[in-house]
Amino acid sequence: MKRIAVVPGDGIGKEVIDAALEVLNTLNLPFKYEWGEAGDAVKEKIGVALPEETLQLCRESDAVLFGAVGETAADVIIKLRMELQTFANLRPAKSFKGVKALYDSVDIVIVRENTECLYKGLEFEVTEGVTESIRVITKEASERIARYAFELAKREGRKRVTALHKANVMRKTCALFRDVCRAVAKDYPEIQFNDYYIDAACMYMVMDPWRFDVIVTTNMFGDIVSDLAAGLVGGLGLAPSGNIGEENAIFEPVHGSAPDIAGKGIANPSAAILSATMMLKHFGYLNEAEKIEKALADTIAEGKTTPDLGGNLKTMGMVEEIQKRLKGEA
Ligand code: NAI
Ligand code: MG
């Protein structure tokens, strides 16, 4: 029995997590769900965004299924990732049939370092009108994430790893990251390796995304290029993620609480459902994950989607369509 801490959060976080659980419940899985509160609403109520009980629940769980929070994201999800030492943030971007996007055959996995860089939160006001932020990059964390990226490439039969950096300007931090990636690449001669400056890589991603297979990069750049990659395949409604550590893992859609559509019941549940299937794969339930992914892909291909993908279904309407396909009723 796996213990899953469910932290829906704010806004559409709650809506898409309800939807993902509904889909998981269609299959018979040995999971015990335990709920934790976090986010803007909790902060308003009790003064803290990530209560100690929730943090404890997450620590004790085998995995966390997280929705999204609002303005307290730095206090909640960034803190959770650091506390649980989930050092690798996986963000796949894959094209879906039937989704209007720039391209129809993108398949990239972004492996983002999740514990350091500018996200350490080492920010200071030096004097009025002058602020500072410290960017921490270590050999140890860079090596760990580079190895993770190559191992993932090996495991998934992928052919190339590309490191993104800006070592021409950040001559210490980015140069260290780049050099460590280059050194680790030598241990994986069967996998191609190259590195690009982050700015040029953004242009290549838009104009020629097939150059990329697995991308490995630092925390801040990884955050930015993963939204770019999501945009290439049809938007945040389709972008899942996993944060993987030695002892714990957090699965969450890339998107936030989307206050512009929250409460309307029209959030696309796909990103949360795909995050749940990443969790299934993490636990070794590969068949179940594939079944759900196929049902979701078929649902999308047939245009049974929420408005962000051009359909007219509500969140739960899309869930029903997926369930029908899971049960072989459609
Ligand atoms: P967002 O991801 O919430 O929304 C960006 C745009 O994408 C909006 O137009 C939204 O309607 C749309 N969108 C996002 N997810 C969607 C879905 N599942 N279905 C359909 N449309 C979807 O990012 P935004 O607007 O920059 O931030 C809103 C709040 O979320 C902020 O308070 C921010 O701090 C927080 N945030 C939290 C994150 C987290 O908890 N991991 C991540 C990103 C933002
Ligand atoms: Mg982001």
Image (cartoon, rainbow, N blue to C red):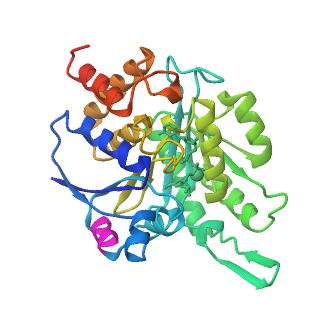
Q: Is residue 147 magenta?
A: no
The reply to whether residue 50 is visible in this rendering is no
Q: Is residue 299 above or below residue 80?
A: above
Q: Is residue 205 left or right of 200 when viewed as pictured?
A: left
Quarter of the picture containing the C terminus is top left
Quadrant of the image occupied by residue 243: bottom left
Question: Going 20% across and 21% down the picture, which residue do you hit?
Answer: 327
Question: Going 61% across and 73% down the picture, which residue do you hit?
Answer: 121
Q: Is residue 64 above or below residue 85?
A: above
Residue 104 image offset from top left, x and y in percent? 59, 20
Bounds of the magenta segment: 53-59
Q: Nearer the viewer, residue 112 or 265?
A: 265
The reply to whether residue 92 is visible in this rendering is yes
Question: Which residue reaches farthest bottom?
Answer: 127
Quadrant of the image occupied by residue 232: top right
Q: Is residue 101 above or below residue 131?
A: above
Question: Going 37% across and 33% down the picture, which residue do you hit?
Answer: 315
Residue 186 image offset from top left, x and y in percent? 62, 50
Q: Is residue 131 left or right of 93 when viewed as pictured?
A: right
Residue 267 image offset from top left, x and y in percent? 44, 37
Residue 19 image offset from top left, x and y in percent? 32, 39
Q: Main secondary structure of the magenta part?
A: helix
Q: Is residue 58 magenta?
A: yes
Q: How many marks?
A: 0
Question: Going 28% across and 26% down the picture, which residue do you hit?
Answer: 320
Quadrant of the image occupied by residue 248: bottom left
